[in-house]
Amino acid sequence: MMCCYGQVMIGSSGNDKTRADIGFAITFEYWGHGIATTVLKMAIPRVFNDFPGIVKLHAFAILDNKASHRVLEKAGFIYQDARVSLLNPSTGESKTFPSSPFELPKSVQNSPVYVTFGIGYNSTCDDYTIVRMAHEFGGQYRYEMKLYSLKNNSWRNIQDLPHPIFHAGSVCCFLNGAFHWFSYHTSYQDGLCVVVLLDISEEKYGEIQIPRLNCWE
């Protein structure tokens, strides 16, 4: 059985200067037996029409925060004007969450911003949580971390990461009560790859070091 991995870059610019350029990367797994995942094809048909054998999708957004009113479809999340909707393509059900504007420093306003979402279940308080990590892509690596509570129907800021870590465009995965990102330290000349985790019950960060390698491979 053949299997291959790859990445698709999608972007748009156009001539309308009132709109921001938005691009997103989709990391996919393609299986040679040709089984298509209808749910994912419904979410982003432009991509899956060309790759009918895709069975898994990961994505992250790169957007210019001067004008973020375009819609971004992202692995079940739809993002528009700092509002987030969670979509279940198999049932057509969706939920839109309250708006939560970016609060990064004003000096970041002309820089692209990486935005990554993750969803998890907090068993301690029986609540579903969404994490939103936004950081500048301009050399300063300034972050904003926010959590959404389904019970409270509200967003709030949480403690920033303990040290500068550049997010390597990885997916946010939820495992054993914690969100996980694949990242690397900016304080190392060659970059030290790590898995950064956020425990949602205690709201504490941690790290899992992995063998030294090129994070972009």
Image (cartoon, helix red, strand yellow):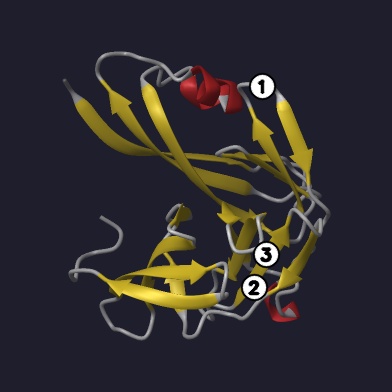
Q: Position of residue 133 (x, y in %)?
A: 59, 64
Q: What amino acid is labelled 1 in the image?
A: Thr
The tag earlier along the polypeptide, 2 or 1, is: 1
Q: Residue at x 57, y 75 (%)?
A: 203
> In the depicted view, which residue is nearer to us: 42 or 154?
154
Q: In terms of sequence position, does the residue under pointer 1 or pointer 3 come before the other?
A: 1
> Residue at position x 81%, y 49% from top?
18
Left or right: 193 in relation to 44:
left
Instruction: Please name the residue that numbered disc 2 is placed on.
Output: 144
Task: State the residue position of label 3.
Answer: 147
Image position of 156 with respect to 95: above or below:
below
CA gap, disc 2 to disc 1?
A: 32 Å
As displayed, is residue 200 above or below residue 1?
Answer: below
Q: CA distance from mark 1 to mark 3?
A: 26 Å
Q: Secondary structure at mark 1?
A: loop
Please name which of the two marks, 2 or 1, marks the residue nearer to the observer: 1
